[in-house]
Amino acid sequence: MTADIEQLMSDLSDPDEGVTRTLSRLEGDLMLLGAGGKIGHGLALMARRALDAAGNGRRVIAVSRFSDAQTRAAMQRDGIETVTCDLADADAVANLPEASDLVYMAGQKFGATGAAGATWMLNTYVPALAAQRWPNSRFAVYSSGNVYPFTLPQSGGPAEDHEPAPIGEYAQSVLGRERMFEYFSIVNTTKVALVRLNYAVEPRYGVLVDLAKNMLAGKPIDLSMGYVNIVWQGDCNRVTLRCLDMAASPPVVLNLAGPGVLRVRELAEQLGREMAVEPRFTGTEGETALLSNGSRCWQAFGPPRIGVEQMVRRVADWLKCAGSTLDKPTHFEVRNGKF
């Protein structure tokens, strides 16, 4: 087995019938704002493939600063149009193309500590610009499970109607992003779906990659955050695009999280068996953890295509083959909200 990037991208961008139906009904182009990050290419490619399958010739437009020229080139090769734009520049945003449907992906998490002003600007001011620029369009907006308080794992995690109680300035500013879209959704009757993601996984990044890399490096696994949710990135992509059909004014909120609460120790032990590495542990499992209840998501869109055992196996196989990673740790173990 080899770590085949092209095959991985094909898997992550494979649309199901629901995605194809949703995008077949697009009345205009689809735009992804902040698409230069780790999720953007696979999501944009899934949209392109679904539109092609549906015979809908609408454009998929990826907008980003594109600091990585290779990412932009790869998107263009896949039939995705790209536009370079600083989304904090109001004039530049005003000059972006029209679109009937948008996925909002921009934001800052890591580096937030010590740069609170920039974090709040990127996570609240920039969303306000976008919400005002396309008042008559539909939005699927990435948010985060970080807006919730820590809860007991046996509770199953907070559902969408749980009162937010974000810990730390990053999480507070993410709630600010939601509030900006909420405000302009109500004022302009803009249809919005707020998608609280917690946590996406694929062989190059995510909680499982963080655990596996530490184990392969001989580092102990910190059990302070003893429980997590994980969801396969391909499933994340298809749910995100189908959420466009759920968008409403006032906004609809959806937790995009794995269907169960998972114990970090057990995930590490499963990875260890796959990689023939004995995990070492440090710290004590806290009574509470950062969790989300994803039941409503899977009731709406059907069960995930990829379950936990397959995720573990695919991550382990990728790393055993020396597959490249994105070197973007999740820092899921952080309990003080400082990223």
Image (spheres, helix red, strand yellow):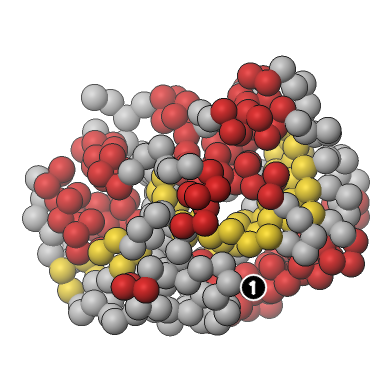
- Residue type pointed to by label 1: Leu
Does 6 sit above or below residue 123? above
Residue occupying the far front of the picture: 299
Residue 139 in view (yes/no): yes
The residue at the point 15 percent across, 43 percent down is: 274
Q: Position of residue 270 (x, y in %)?
A: 17, 51
- Of residue 320 and residue 227, the one placed in the foreground of this image is 227
User: Where is residue 35 drawn, in percent x and y?
Assistant: 64, 45
Across and down, in percent, residue 300 comes to: 55, 48
Q: Is residue 222 left or right of residue 118?
A: left
Q: Quadrant of residue 5?
A: top left
- Comparing 40 with 289, the one in front is 289
Nearer to the camera, 110 or 188: 188
Please give the residue where the numbered disc 1 appears in the rendered image: 175
Residue at the spot x=20%, y=64% of the render?
Answer: 265
Q: Is residue 45 above or below residue 163?
A: above
Residue ID at (33%, 72%): 153
Q: Does residue 74 show up?
A: no
Q: Residue 57: image x %, image y %?
A: 77, 21
- Left or right of 251 on screen, residue 132: right
- Residue 334 shown left or right of residue 107 in the figure: left
Task: Please report the residue visible at 27 percent of the width from the left and 57 percent of the height from the top.
Answer: 211
Instruction: Locate residue 96: give its quadrant.
Output: top right
Q: Secondary structure at mark 1?
A: helix
Count of number-bearing discs: 1
Disc 1 residue crowd, few under 14, some 14–19, many 20+, Cα 10 Å = many
* Quadrant of the rendering where the N terminus is positioned: top left
